[in-house]
Image (spheres, helix red, strand yellow):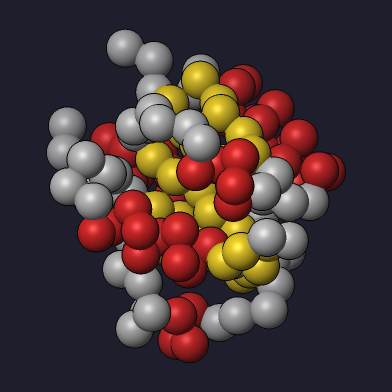
Amino acid sequence: MRKEITILEDDQDIREICTYVFEAEGFKVNSYSTVSSFMDCHTAPDIYLLDIRLPDGNGLEVCQFLKADPKFSAIPVILMSANYEQSSIKDLCSAESFLAKPFDIELLVDRASQLVNRDH
């Protein structure tokens, strides 16, 4: 069965690269550039990839929202940011993983695949 990832990233280049790479890995990709467009989607993918700093909100708050909702709480979340460190966000959101930008794209794909397949 095809895995699905939802990406929330305002940087168009990063969003396009992530979309391309995950599609090449066989994922169905949903991508959004704003919190408001993301919140309008009601799908439950296999994993979320969330940027923290966004033009109309914050990926940490989105993560808190997802983890508080039983429909989404078990879905793994990877947070990414150039402006935060893992130690500064671990108490703010219970994301399964964090990547500092710039990040190695292979590391991102490996981490996402591990999280998606952890229960199988």
Whether 111 is drawn above or below 44: the answer is: below
Query: Residue reaching furthest top?
Result: 1
Whether 16 is drawn above or below 13: the answer is: above
Question: Residue 117: percent from the left, percent from the top?
Answer: 27, 36
For the point 59% across and 47% down, which residue is it? 36
In this view, the residue in front, 120 or 60, is: 60
For the point 70% across and 27% down, which residue is it? 20
In this view, the residue in front, 100 or 83, is: 83
For the point 81% across and 43% down, which residue is it? 12
- Please give left or right for residue 89 compared with residue 73 in the image: right
> In which quadrant is the N terminus drawn?
top left
Residue 15 lies in quadrant = top right
Whether 74 is drawn above or below 63: the answer is: above
Query: Residue reaching furthest bottom?
Result: 88
How many discs mark residues in the rendered view? 0
For the point 35% across and 65% down, which residue is it? 64
- Please give left or right for residue 59 compared with residue 120 in the image: right
Say if residue 109 shows up in the picture: no
Question: Residue 27: percent from the left, percent from the top?
Answer: 49, 23
Question: Residue 120: percent from the left, percent from the top?
Answer: 17, 32
Residue 114 lies in quadrant = top left
Question: Residue 92: percent from the left, percent from the top?
Answer: 38, 79
- Please give left or right for residue 107 compared with residue 42 in the image: right
Query: Residue reaching furthest right?
Result: 13
